[in-house]
Structures are given as structure tokens and as C-alpha cells.
Amino acid sequence: MNTRHAFLAVALAVATLSGGAPSMAAEGTPNPPRGSWSFSGVFGTYDRAQLQRGFKVYREVCQSCHELKIPFRTLAQNGGPQFSVPQVTALAAEYKIQDGPNDAGDMFERPGRPADFIPAPFPNENAAASANGGKAPPPLQLMAKARSFERGFPWFVIDALPFLQYQEHGPDYIHALLTGYEEPPAGFTVPPGGHYNKYFPGHVIAMPKPISDGQVEYPKGPDGRSPVPETVDQYSRDLAAFLMWTAEPALEQRKRLGFVVIIFLAVFAYLMYYVKKKVWAQVGGEAEGAPGTAPLGPTG
């Protein structure tokens, strides 16, 4: 066993003994627990129903403060929530889009179209900051890729291995943040306007708890009940999955292409190896039979 394999074996052993407990950041903030996502792994795909629920959570909870810079039409495209075209058309028409100028030189409002971007909740960044305590809420379309964290030993070793890389930092962080609101521990002082969150760096976050159990009503099944629980945990999972799609809408295509490329490279490598053996076998045979050369063998 070489040094690299020995180091990996030790890392795996420590991971097993640690029981998968989340590592602690330098400032004492626990890393978000690793979740189970349909889009993780080499063959992972998005759950369409989950993406639709996640969009509903964004629209009813997050849209009042956070911008989402995507066109309506992407909600009907393959690889995404896959709402029907009539659904997207009706959804876009519920919004008022500023357009113009008209023939008189004036700006006007019209119903939204599928080609329009989802309108921002505020007309500009200054207005957003003024309405939110001096700081504008960040847009969410890339949040699942913009938020990350470092995992401690031994996980960073495993993350460096092909096909085992941990790429769900963002969704795990979003889910943990939305479920991490709780009462501060004894001796911890939360400043005015702040809120205690277990997973936020420093534990003090300006955003109040945005969602509660039963706040968003999901579509009901044939039995008149929602197929998933209407809880903060489920809301946050669905929203995190939806934001993962907005950040990486081509994830499924990328994974399919990557798998095809790996198969191609494997076949190509085998063909090159086979050709190399055939070519060098012929070169070796010609060298042994060339004039002025003696066959190799024992001397004496």
C-alpha cells in the first residue's frame, strides 16, 4: 500500500468513527448537515415536482424582498420545473411590466409575457436597501452556487476524489439557514434588529425568520392532502432545490455529456493501447529478422 492509499484509508476510518458529525468552522459555527438531493451524484436529476413547489415557496415567501433574474419562459423549458406553456403565459400575465416609450414618448405598464424577466420587488438597489434596514437583499438566481463552506478533515480528502466530490454546499447551506433560527443560548447577546441563526456565520442575521409551518399551501393529491408535509424543513428543501436549478439549469445535460465523454475516452484509450501493441509487435518482429542481427538467446 503506497502513501496515498494509506492516507485515504486513515481518512475513511476517521470519517466512520466520527459518525458523520458536522465539522465546526473556525468561528464556532457548525457546518450545515449534508442533505439528500435528487440531483446529487453522477446520474442525479432534478425532481420536477420539487422544483415547482420550490418556485411556489419563492413566489409566496421570498419574492417580496429578493430578486430572481430569470425569464418566465425558462420555467417551461426542459430540465426545469416544466410548467406548461399556458401556465407560464398565465403566470407572466399576472405581473405588470414597464415598457415603452410609446408614440407619445411615455412609459407604460403592460401584462407580462413569457419572454419577460420576473420583475424585481424594488425599482432599484437604493429602494431595496431603504426598505430593508440599509442593505439590499441579494438576488437569488445564483445563491446556490455563491454560498459555500469548507468541510474539515477528513471530508476535504474525500471531496478531492473523482465522482465523490461534494457539490451541494449551496443547497445544504440554504436549507440549514432557513431551519437554523432558534433562541440564542445563555450568555449570547443579539443586537437590536438581529436574529439568532445557528448556521449563519457569527450567528446574528438581519433577516427575520421568513417562513413557518403551514405558511405555503402545496397542491393537493386525489385524497385532498399534500403529498409532502407543509413544514419549514420541506419548504426549505424545495426552495434550495429550485435555487440550485436557477444557478445551474444545465446540470442534467452536463452530467449526461460528461458520462458520454468518459465512455468515449475509455474506448479511445483501449483502441490506442491495442494499436500500440500491434505496431510495436511488428516493429519488434522486423528488428529480430533484420540482416546482420543475431537472435537473442543464451551465450556460451
Image (tube, rainbow, N blue to C red):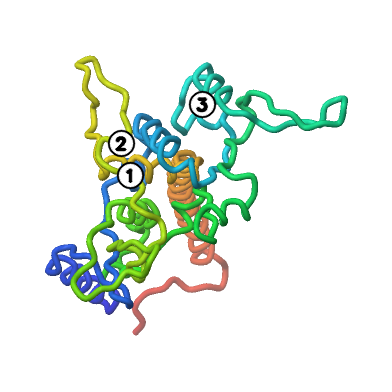
Residue 36: % across, % down = 26, 47
Q: Identify the residue position indicated by label 1 in the image.
A: 211
- Image quarter in which the N terminus is found: bottom left
Task: Please give the name of the residue rendered at 87% of the width and 26% of the height, measured from the top-left corner.
Answer: 104
Position above or below: 256 against 192: above
SS under mark 3: helix
Q: Are marks 2 and 1 in contact (CB under 8 Å)?
A: yes
The kind of residue tagged 2 is Gln
The kind of residue tagged 1 is Ile
Q: Residue furthest bottom?
A: 300
Q: Looking at the image, which is closer to me, 78 or 63?
A: 63
In the rendering, which numbered label is found on residue 34?
none
In the rendering, which numbered label is found on residue 76?
3
**Within 10 angstroms of label 1, few (less than 14), some, or many (20 or more) residues?**
some
Q: Identify the residue position indicated by label 2 in the image.
A: 215
**Within 10 angstroms of label 2, few (less than 14), some, or many (20 or more) residues?**
some
- Image quarter in which the C terminus is found: bottom left
Discs 3/1, front: 1
Alpha carbons under labels 2 and 1: distance apart = 7 Å
Alpha carbons under labels 3 and 1: distance apart = 27 Å
Q: Are marks 3 and 1 in contact (CB under 8 Å)?
A: no
Q: Earlier in the sequence, mark 2 or mark 3?
A: 3
Task: Please give the name of the residue rendered at 44% of the width and 43% of the height, measured from the top-left corner.
Answer: 62
Alpha carbons under labels 2 and 3: distance apart = 26 Å
